[in-house]
């Protein structure tokens, strides 16, 4: 229906050129504040715009390929561009594997006062390796210029900075404080684009040795005290995690002869940076309006951007079907030349669309110099959200870091609303070896039961806020966000009050592998509205380690809302494909501070009794997990200002 | 087999600790086996909060590698960070440690003061004392166990 309406509107646009629908002619002559040849024009001025479905799906090349695109899902950004709001006055810093600062489609927006290279210790972040094209791709998604060449970014008039921060030679460690706003070249950033993740082989500890905590908790000091935000990747480990050394697969759940991936292998909370409030953790959606097949889930997701699908084939990515993880990706800038970057001579057309394969007919016609490419991942979704935030700040530079989060949250769109009932996610699973899907569909969590539902889909909490472990608060909505930014007057305090931990609120909660156990409960007298709740888990001193690869952690709020902070059978459960096979089941000890969090209770009162459950699968024998280990659990609650 | 230490040479006598020290490199984030750890003999330790870290012998002149209670390898450069209070307050709090501090950096935009100590034990001791003595401050001793990767 939505698609039909948009198609009709597109038809109207073609028939009546006086009605601007982002055709590039501009409809805001009377109100347009932008000047120059592209004033208030959409990206239709750029030759590759038809492939940038995330900017205008209905008129994109992919709209007619219904197996990979719904012809409707995009950022809803054209109206903003038509108003001439394109990121003017906003500074974005892309921390990545480098940035080709002389790229034909980026150089007009690059500020040389906002660049750095941690490998060479100079101001040129242009990568030397032909494979380090990630940062240039990410930068183009948010900041490619509107210049009649190539592609256009979500915020094409933003000021762009970048650093060679990732993929550094062994032994070189980037100074996180300098990268995160402490250096002359980083301190003026309004938005930090972090299309990366830290993935460890064992559950991380969140404590006073975390390298990034101090910097991220100090983000509210940036922007003259209004505070900066970091838009950060959720991760691409829904099904598995491969990085060359640490290759982890997760069990699939059997129903009849088929198996299903019920839970996310990776959890967004496994990167401790994502637990910091100024970090906007971003999931990835595809052109069909669903979660991308790879996008990691978790209860600390804030928003969803658009990052395309895993496998892209055909001429431009139009082949296959989304249900097989096929579909278009995000078109952007690549390292220039057919001997460098992701688009180059000699790459396989089996795994890439013709557009990026150097020397093919399509490549010669549309991408002759291999200056452009397409990419996927939460890496690609992050800059789409970064771009939207830049548009918001361009429309209202007074927004503080909390206001940015708030507007993103309030304007986000709930998509794929019924996913919790799809592919047996509404069924309970058996918490025993060779996990199977039960027939029972109840979402009731029964203490002592050997089955439980692991995914609750979209939920509406008692404050009326919709939340999903797949999508956070939903898909970003550029027009609604900018409209709200323009009319925004109730600015939130920018000071970040970090709550103290209440340690051992639950002492020695017993984990019974293979069943549901109530670990304990704690009472909170603070009547404030909840922003995020965090739990700090450790094994009891002198007791056995707890195998968190098998232990799901669920928590019920005083209002009765349930949130899944960690699922059993996660990335730490079984690393049988690992080249560096630890196979310890994700053990945490009494010295661990394994911290999980949830935004699912946003806006609810925190006052009352919270109940914590362990929903535990059965560890592999090789993990040597002791039976009935005990957990101590502390908590802290950030309140919504 | 893998585990954290990549032994560069094929034959290493466990008893030849000097040889081991000279010929090993450490892989960040990897987990050492107990047998690998015991080959180093007695190691210096330091405590941060309730956590005990063991300092690995330096190799190739590159020190600062540590392991946690699970044998996981991290890198600590001995920087104590103070945030959450004014820069002046943080600097003043570091005065008693001047003899152990080799460099001091002030990140004004973030309001963070970073002091690099001449050894990890001194840094940890200072971190623990400062965390108790500066009300409202966050005091950290960063240890890197994993590096960010494009995702």
Image: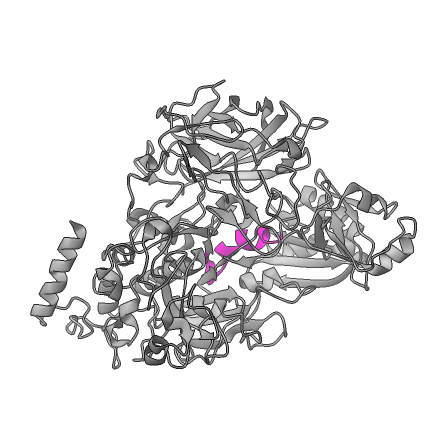
- Which quadrant would residue A229 be assigned to in this image? bottom left
Q: Is residue A85 visible?
A: no
Is A399 part of what is drawn in magenta? no
Percent coordinates x, y for residue B147 in the rendering? 61, 56
Is A212 part of what is drawn in magenta? yes
Q: Is residue A201 left or right of residue B45?
A: left
Residue at the location (85% across, 48% down)? B40
Which coloring applies here?
one colour
Q: Nearer the viewer, residue A404 or A151?
A: A151
Percent coordinates x, y for residue A526 in the rendering? 46, 30
Percent coordinates x, y for residue A413 in the rendering? 28, 48
Q: Nearer the viewer, residue A278 or A312?
A: A312
- Which quadrant would residue A371 be assigned to in this image? bottom left
Q: Is residue B34 left or right of residue A566?
A: right
| Residue bounds of the magenta highlight | A211-231
Q: Please, which residue is most extreme toward the front here? A: A257
């Amino acid at each position: 229906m939505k698609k039909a309406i948009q198609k009709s509107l597109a038809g109207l646009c073609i028939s009546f050129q006086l009605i601007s629908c982002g055709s590039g002619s501009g409809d805001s002559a009377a109100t347009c504040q932008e000047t120059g040849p592209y004033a208030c024009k959409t990206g239709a001025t750029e030759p590759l715009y038809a492939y940038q479905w995330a900017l205008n799906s209905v008129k994109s090349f992919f709209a007619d390929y219904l197996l990979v695109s719904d012809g409707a899902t995009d950022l809803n950004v054209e109206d903003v561009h038509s108003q001439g709001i394109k990121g003017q006055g906003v500074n974005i810093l892309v921390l990545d594997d480098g940035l080709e600062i002389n790229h034909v489609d980026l150089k007009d927006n690059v500020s040389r006062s906002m660049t750095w290279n941690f490998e060479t210790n100079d101001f040129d972040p242009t990568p030397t390796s032909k494979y380090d094209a990630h940062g240039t791709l990410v930068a183009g998604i948010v900041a490619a210029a509107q210049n009649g060449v190539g592609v256009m970014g979500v915020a094409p008039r933003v000021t762009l900075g970048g650093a060679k921060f990732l993929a550094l030679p062994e032994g070189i460690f980037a100074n996180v404080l300098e990268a995160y706003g402490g250096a002359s070249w980083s301190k003026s950033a309004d938005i930090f684009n972090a299309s990366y993740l830290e993935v460890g082989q064992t559950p991380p500890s969140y404590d006073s040795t975390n390298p990034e905590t101090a910097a991220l908790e100090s983000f509210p000091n940036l922007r003259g005290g209004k505070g900066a935000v970091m838009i950060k990747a959720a991760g691409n480990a829904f099904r598995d995690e491969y990085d060359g050394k640490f290759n982890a697969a997760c069990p699939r759940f059997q129903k009849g002869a088929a198996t299903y991936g019920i839970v996310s292998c990776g959890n967004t909370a496994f990167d401790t940076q994502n637990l910091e409030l100024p970090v906007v953790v971003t999931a990835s959606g595809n052109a069909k309006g669903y979660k991308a097949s790879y996008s990691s889930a978790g209860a600390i997701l804030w928003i969803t951007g658009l990052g395309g699908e895993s496998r892209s084939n055909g001429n431009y990515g139009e082949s296959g079907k989304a249900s097989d993880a096929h579909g278009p990706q995000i078109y952007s800038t690549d390292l220039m030349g057919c001997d460098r970057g992701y688009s180059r001579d000699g790459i396989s057309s089996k795994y890439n669309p013709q557009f990026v394969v150097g020397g093919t007919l399509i490549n010669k016609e549309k991408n002759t110099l291999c200056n452009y490419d397409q990419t996927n991942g939460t890496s690609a979704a992050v800059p789409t959200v970064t771009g939207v935030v830049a548009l918001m700040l361009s429309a209202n530079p007074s927004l503080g870091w909390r206001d940015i989060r708030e507007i993103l949250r309030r304007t986000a769109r709930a998509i794929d609303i019924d996913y919790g009932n799809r592919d047996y996610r509404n069924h309970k699973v058996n918490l025993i070896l060779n996990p199977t899907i039960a027939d029972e569909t109840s979402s009731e969590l029964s203490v002592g039961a050997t089955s439980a539902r692991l995914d609750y889909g979209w939920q509406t909490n008692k404050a009326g806020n919709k939340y999903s472990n797949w999508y956070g608060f939903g898909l970003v909505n550029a027009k609604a966000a900018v409209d709200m930014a323009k009319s925004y007057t109730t600015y939130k305090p920018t000071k970040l009050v970090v709550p103290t931990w209440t340690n051992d609120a639950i002492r020695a909660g017993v984990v019974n592998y293979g069943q549901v156990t109530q670990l304990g409960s704690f009472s909170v007298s603070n009547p404030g509205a909840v922003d995020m709740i965090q739990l700090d888990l450790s094994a009891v001193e002198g007791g056995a380690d707890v195998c968190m690869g098998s232990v799901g952690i669920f928590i019920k709020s005083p209002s009765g809302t349930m949130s899944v902070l960690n699922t059993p059978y996660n990335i730490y459960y079984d690393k049988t494909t690992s080249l560096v096979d630890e196979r310890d089941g994700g053990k945490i000890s009494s010295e661990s501070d394994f911290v999980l969090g949830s935004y699912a209770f946003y806006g609810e009162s925190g006052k009352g009794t919270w109940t914590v459950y362990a929903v535990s699968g059965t560890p592999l024998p090789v993990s040597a997990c002791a039976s009935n280990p005990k957990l101590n659990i502390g908590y802290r609650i950030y309140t919504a200002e | 087999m893998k585990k954290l230490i990549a032994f560069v040479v094929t034959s290493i006598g466990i008893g030849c600790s000097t040889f081991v020290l000279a010929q090993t490199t450490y892989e960040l984030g990897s987990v050492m086996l107990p047998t690998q750890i015991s080959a180093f003999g007695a190691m210096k330790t330091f405590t941060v909060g309730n956590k005990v870290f063991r300092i690995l012998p330096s190799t190739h002149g590159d020190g600062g590698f540590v392991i946690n209670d699970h044998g996981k390898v991290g890198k600590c450069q001995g920087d104590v960070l103070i945030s959450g209070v004014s820069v002046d307050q943080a600097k003043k709090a570091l005065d008693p440690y001047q003899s152990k501090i080799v460099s001091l950096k002030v990140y004004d935009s973030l309001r963070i003061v970073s002091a690099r100590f001449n050894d990890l034990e001194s840094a940890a001791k200072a971190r623990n004392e400062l965390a108790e003595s500066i009300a409202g401050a966050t005091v950290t001793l960063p240890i890197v166990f994993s590096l960010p990767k494009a995702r």
